[in-house]
Amino acid sequence: MRQPVELADAFVTLDGEPLAHAVVASDRGARRRGARGVTHMTDMLVLPKTRHVHTFGCKVPLGVAFCAEDGRVLKVQRMEPRRMSAWVPQAKFVVEWEWDAIPEDLIVEGRSLAVAL
């Protein structure tokens, strides 16, 4: 039997300022599923313990921010469906969003993303 996917409600801040509602993929199954099959993302998706992602099964382009343990954005990628990201060994978590939902110059390397549950 398939286990239920665990998603926790959260809020993401950018440099201490509120940015968006999010859900945290709090278990391995939820991280593996990610944004697969989603045609429109209303919330950001936070993937703890993640250093790379894929967009196989995604229907929309995603923005992906790889973050250090302290929240510093290490790398930002626009990812089209059916792609693999770069491996970012220093990343401790990833934040994903629908690319068109946030201006592309807002989440950039060096800024800080924090996740509050």
Image (cartoon, helix red, strand yellow):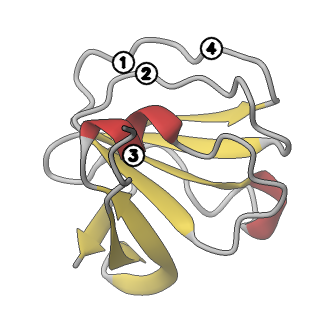
Separation of residues labelled 1 and 4 (CA atoms): 12 Å
> Given contact means CB atoms under 8 Å apart, are the residues at marks 2 and 1 in contact?
yes
Mark 4 secondary-structure assignment: loop
- In which image quadrant can residue 31 be found? top left
Q: Amino acid at mark 1?
A: Val
Mark 3: give few (<14), some (14-19) or many (20+) Cα within 10 Å: some
Say which amino acid is labelled 4: Met
Left or right: 58 as drawn, with respect to 70: right
Q: Amino acid at mark 3?
A: Ala
Q: Tell me the CA gap for discs 3 and 1.
A: 20 Å
Up/down of 51 relative to 38, above or below: above
Q: Are marks 4 and 2 in contact (CB under 8 Å)?
A: yes
| Mark 4: few/some/many CA within 10 Å (<14, 14-19, 20+) | few
In the image, 108 versus 79, the foreground residue is 79
Of tags 1 and 4, the one toward the viewer is 4
Question: Residue at point 39% right, 86% down?
Answer: 17
- What amino acid is labelled 2 in the image? His
Please report whichever mark, 4 or 3, sits nearer to the chain's N-terminal start.
Answer: 3
Q: Which residue is mark 3?
A: 30
Decide which of 21, 69 is in the foreground and name it. Answer: 21
Q: CA distance from mark 2 to mark 3?
A: 15 Å
Name the element at disc 3: helix
Say which residue label 2 marks: 52
Where does residue 46 sit, x and y in percent of width and height?
A: 39, 55
Mark nearer the N terminus (2 vs 1): 2
